[in-house]
Amino acid sequence: MPEHYPNISNPALFPVFSYLWVFNDRMNIGKKILLFGLLLIAFSSCRILRPSIMLKTPKNYDFAKITDSLTKENYRVTATDAVLIRLFSNDGFKLIDISSTANGSGTGPSIEETVDSDGMLKVPLLGKVKVAGLTVREAQALLEKEYETYYRKPFVQMKIVNKRVIVFPGMAGTARVVPIANNNTTVFEALAAAGGIQEDGKAYRVKLIRTIDNKPVVYLIDLSTIDGIAAGNITLLANDVIYVEPRPRIATRLIQEIAPYLTLVTTTLTLVLFLKR
């Protein structure tokens, strides 16, 4: 065995260092360590060592710009939203009529419809009305105006009942589908609902992926410093995806992948050296 063979406490590292010392017996320790480091860097880009990394972007990817409007924007109706609608006349008098409520009839009828892929919502009497891209209040005002033909002072209540976002907090097995409880749920709130950024997650590489006009728009958010508060308060839309890039365990993965092969090589070489004595 070489004179300067290191004392390796972790048996899993033995095949790696055995390979370096057997084939580079005349190389000093510093060069051997440098060589090992270069091997790690070379293998770090291999897909086999980072198989769980999702939603990768090219090195020079042009991320969408984060503007103040994203943090102040109200929720906007989008395709596939399930919409619950309640319609009242007389400015919603029946909604607050105490005697009607006591009789159990104050809640009024409701209907639930889904916004089509073209942004149209089918409602009674009116047929299809385009609501995609509007805030909930804007959509309510639009329906109230359209219903003036049929009702006196119509009052419309609208609620989105299937709003959700998908959160990947940075560790395998922790992804969650998070329901959006209100119209102004933020990135921070969704991450908190998913348990926060995991230990292996990169707080400085959080991707917010939003589909606009059937194309993905990606925002890169840095939540590692106090400067990230504004970006963390971006208002979420239904079907947004929050992806916290995980920290790859390159060394561990490398050892797991090549250890069996190096063990075989090391065993063979050890046997050959033993027979030559």
Image (tube, grey):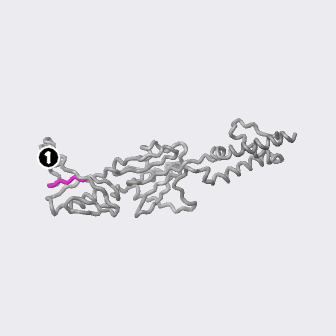
Find residue 237 and report its horizontal and vertical position in percent.
38, 54
Q: Is residue 88 magenta?
A: yes
Relative to 233, 225 lies left or right: right
Q: Is residue 79 magenta?
A: no
Residue furthest out toward the top: 9
Amino acid type shown at disc 1 = Asp
The residue at the point 14 percent across, 43 percent down is 98
Q: Quadrant of the C terminus?
A: top right
Tell which of 179 and 20 is nearer to you. Answer: 20
Find residue 249 and report its horizontal and vertical position in percent.
61, 46
Relative to 45, 98 lies left or right: left
The residue at the point 35 percent across, 61 percent down is 117
The mark tally for this picture is: 1
Find residue 62 and report its horizontal and vertical position in percent.
52, 63
Secondary structure mostly seen in the magenta stretch: strand
Tell which of 227 and 240 is nearer to you. Answer: 240
**Magenta stretch, residue numbers:** 85-90
Tell which of 95 and 241 is nearer to you. Answer: 241
Tell which of 229 and 160 is nearer to you. Answer: 160
Which residue is disc 1 drawn over?
97
Label 1 environment density (alpha carbons within 10 Å; few <14, some 14–19, many ≥20) = few
The residue at the point 76 percent across, 39 percent down is 6
Q: Quadrant of the N terminus?
A: top right
Find residue 153 and report its horizontal and vertical position in percent.
16, 58
Residue furthest out toward the left: 99
Label 1: state its secondary structure.
Answer: loop
